[in-house]
Structures are given as C-alpha cells and as structure tokens.
Amino acid sequence: MNRPYTICYMMTSVDGRIDCDMVGRLAGVEDYYPLLDKLGLQSAVSGKRTAQLELAEPGAFAPRNSAPLGKDVVSKKTDSSSGYTIVVDTKGTLLWKHDSQYAQPHILITSQQVSQEYLSYLDEKNISYIVAGDAKIDLAAASDVLKETFGIERMGVVGGPAINTAFLDAGLLDEVIVLSGAGIDGRASFPPVFHREGEGPSEPTPLKLIEAKTYDSGAVFIRYRIK
C-alpha cells in the first residue's frame, strides 16, 4: 500500500459532537483553520453529508440511465501544488460548479455504482474523479491513487462520522486530532467523531498521545497516533 499519510482532524464539543452549525458557535472555532494550515493538510477529504452542507450546489444529479458503470476508472484533470478538495460520493449525486470557480480543484471518489452520465457531468465541470470498488468505495485503492496519480503526500479526513469511521475501519488513519471547543452539545441524535451503525468491534482502537495544548479560548488540542 502506497498511500498518503492520513490524519482525521475534527473540531468537537466537549461531549464529542460535530454538528456543523453547533461547532461554528463554539469558543475556539477560530483556531481550527490556522491549525489545519500548520498541520500541512492541504488536501482534505469530506463525506457526502458534509459536502452537501458546505461544498456542493443544492439539488441532486438524476441520470436518465442509472445503470452502474461497473469498472474502476481514474480521470485526472488538473495538477495542483496547493492540494485538492476530495469528496466521497458513493453513487455520484452531488452537484458542482465548474471546477475553475473553486479555490482548489476537486477530486470526486465514487464506487462502480456510479452512472456513466454522472462521470460525463464531472468531465463537463472539469472535475477529476476516482472510481474504486464495486458495491462500496474501496478506500484503500482510492488512497493509493491519490498518492500515485495526484501526488498527495499528506491529507486530512475532516468529516463526518461515516467517512471518519470508514477510514478508521479500513486501517487508513495514521493520526486522530481533536480540537475540543469550550461547549457542550448534549443532543443524542447528533453523532460523534466516529460512529458505527449496529454492532461494531468491542475493543477500542489503541492510541498514543503525542501532543496536547490549551488555548485562551478554552479549546483543547489533543493529538494521537494510532498504534
């Protein structure tokens, strides 16, 4: 496996919740992006839900022919020394502006369940894509492509809980960093940083603490390496 060094970096409430609207009101949120820059994570991976809320255009792509593509494909549109915005969208439904309108070029990662029409749509938008995996995305294969084809050496996984957990369970995370803001959410309906549906492994993932510090805002930065 030849993949980028990968760090899950999230801002949470004290009780570990990561709802975007709530996090944006926490004391310490102003420290999140400066720390992201210091970590050298120019390329960041978001899940579909986070992309819907923060990155993509309103609406959903509806192909006339929804037959799955059924094969792995890589299409690189742009070289970028300043990194990429990477979005995981298993079946290909998110809508986008032309890629030239964004500060960073995009890479869309889908499974073979994506339609050819959606890939043609991405071609029109000049958006790069990686198709990897049959019924679900093969994150390990996609990560290899991110390094070997796009030259990404370090990247951040920045939410939400489904994509964070998928990278964790695939053994693709090297570090976990939590910036805990000075506030409590408390809503049981909102998931934490990692969240498995149904029964998961009973043993916790062991971590090694490598850095911890506090900020005047009351936020706490905790950095772990996955053993």
Image (tube, rainbow, N blue to C red):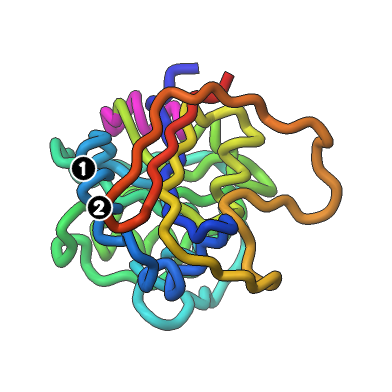
Label count reads 2
Q: Residue at x 43, y 38 (%)?
A: 222
Residue segment shown in magenta? 143-152
Image quarter hosting the C terminus: top right
- Between 110 and 120, which is closer to the camera in this rendering? 110
- Between 19 and 50, which is closer to the camera in this rendering? 19
Q: Label 2: which residue?
A: 33
- Secondary structure mostly seen in the magenta stretch: helix
Residue 144 magenta-drawn?
yes
Please report contact status of discs 2 and 1: CB closer than 8 Å, yes or no.
yes
Q: Position of residue 112 (x, y in %)?
A: 59, 48
Q: Label 1: which residue?
A: 37
Along the horizontal axis of the image, is 152 left or right of 221? left
Q: Position of residue 216 (x, y in %)?
A: 26, 53
Mark identifier at residue 197:
none
Q: Residue at x 52, y 77 (%)?
A: 62
Residue 181 magenta-drawn?
no
Q: Position of residue 218 (x, y in %)?
A: 36, 55
Image position of 216 with respect to 75: above or below: below
Image position of 38 with respect to 160: above or below: above
- Between 145 and 113, which is closer to the camera in this rendering? 145
Q: Residue at x 67, y 52 (%)?
A: 195
